[in-house]
Image (tube, rainbow, N blue to C red):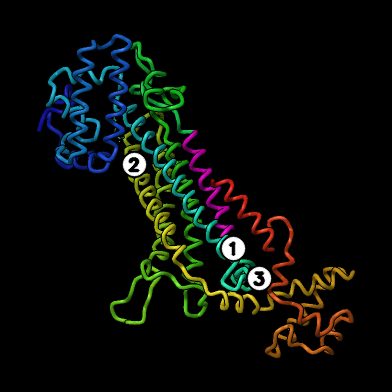
Amino acid sequence: QDKKLWGGRFAEATDGLVERFNASVSFDQRLAEQDIRGSLAHVAMLGEVGILTPDEVAQIQDGLKAVLADIRAGTFEWRLDREDVHMNVEAALRDRIGPVAGKLHTARSRNDQVAVDFRLFTKEAALDLADRTRSLRAVMVAEAEKHLASDDGEAVILPGYTHLQVAQPILLSHWFMAYAAMLERDEGRFRDAAARMDESPLGSSALAGTPWPIDRHATAAALGFARPTANSLDGVGSRDFALEFLSACAILAAHLSRLSEELILYSTFEFGFLTLPDSHTTGSSIMPQKKNPDVSELARGKAGRVFGNLMGLLTVVKGTPLAYNKDLQEDKEGVFDSYDTLSIILRLYADMLPKTVWHPEVTKAAAARGFSTATDLADFLARSGVPFREAHEVVGGLVGLASRTGRQLWDLTDEELRAAHPLLSAETARSLTVEESVRGRQSYGGTAPERVREQVEAAKAALS
Ligand code: ARG
């Protein structure tokens, strides 16, 4: 145990349990690279403005680089009694280069150090998740393109649902493009968040700024930030950059969870729409026949912790007065966790979706069930001048009749149809195929093959 870096005024040693409770080094050592980058930028600036001599700067820089090399090599000794990443690095620097190490902390506080480290980390994490989200979107678009023409040259048809009741036939490609659209906005949220957090808090010092003639613009630029934060209290006291990152994570997790639920459902024996690859499913230790969609179940379930991380930090921040409070040490683990969780799910799905086999005959047959073309029949009547509400009523009556007698709309007899409305006939009912239904939905953004191909082409152009 060495003397605490802040130990000057203390007469008694820190209680052992307090030390453990207070320490963050077990998790914030993950910020070591950012911490040393921050220190290198800070010390270079101290030299430039004449606060430190060129010799002092060189000694500190060499020492920091040596510490970084130890950390990278895994030979660095992380010490709980040194509390956090910042004081571990600084104490190790002092072990190496002696008392001159103490000059590094001139015009700086751990408060701005942790704020700058964590912003650097979160900005990189946001941009990384933006890239990974984009890669998964490219996979979705490629799948959409693939299923526009299946083996027999026809686009794959899927039942479209509302309330999980069959609603209208759609193209499988349309379904893929819906997820691509969500992922596009998810990517945008990460990039927007990264742009907004692109400000350096370094030089805010403890909270009020510093009397030293520092150059915050220089350190901001050296660290790749667009500018320094404009207010020192805000710089050290705010964590909305992390909240914004966590909310973008939460929304993405919600989208991936919905996707997971659909894949789980569609892979069941009862649906049989798709077969998940062996490489991304697991078996049961007792039931030999089982093939379980664990990846999707975990992706669905892990949304819980990703939401929790957002709610957790919101709750940590909400009652804290300006500026820094130790509560804010609780900001990091949730961000690390959401980042790691989503990073792996995005990779898993990018690998798994192209290996997932869809069964077009099954999906098409399912799309035809459940009176999915009833709207088309109502539209047929409405096109002939029948008010849509009346057409809806007529077709609703026919659906009731067919459903009571265990038939489909196209099984109804000529007489039954004509009795319901003189414009209807067996021939009209027979023309109600799922292909016709899909082909007809030509509105912008609709599921007609031409419209979906336009979506695919636009997405490919945007991604290239
Ligand atoms: N480990 C601390 C954190 O993560 C660093 C900042 C500590 N500042 C302080 N005044 N105690 O928030």
Q: Secondary structure at mark 3?
A: strand
Q: Which residue lies under the disc numbered 2?
A: 332
Q: Secondary structure at mark 2?
A: helix
Residue type indicated by callout 2: Lys
Asked whether mark 2 lies closer than 8 Å to ligand 1, one says yes
Answer with mark 2 or mark 3, whichever residue precedes in sequence: 3
Distance from label 2 to label 1 (Cα)?
A: 39 Å
Q: Residue at x 67, y 63 (%)?
A: 449
Q: What whole-number distance in Å separates the C-alpha atoms at marks 1 and 3? A: 12 Å
Question: Where are the magenta residues, as a range?
Answer: 176-195
Tag 3: residue type? Answer: Pro
Residue in the foreground of this view, choosing between 254 and 382: 382
Mark 1 residue's CB less than 8 Å from ligand 1: no
| Disc 2 from disc 3: Cα separation | 46 Å
Pointer 2: residues within 10 angstroms few (<14), some, or many (20+)? many
Horizontal side of 198 relative to 449 (left or right) equals: left
Mark 3 sits on what residue?
A: 169
The reply to whether the C-beta atoms of the residues labelled 2 and 3 are less than 8 Å apart is no
Quadrant in the rendering for residue 91: top left
Asked if the stretch drawn in magenta spans residue 193, the answer is yes
Q: Residues within 10 Å of mark 1 (few under 14, many from 20)?
A: many
Of 104 and 24, the residue lying toward us = 104
Tell me which residue sits at (68%, 89%) in the image. 406
Q: Is residue 376 found inside the magenta-colored segment of the image?
A: no
Q: Quadrant of ligand 1?
A: top left
- Viewer-proximal residue, 303 or 33? 33
Q: Does 54 appear above or below 97?
A: above
**Residue marked by disc 1:** 173
**Amino acid of disc 1:** Ser
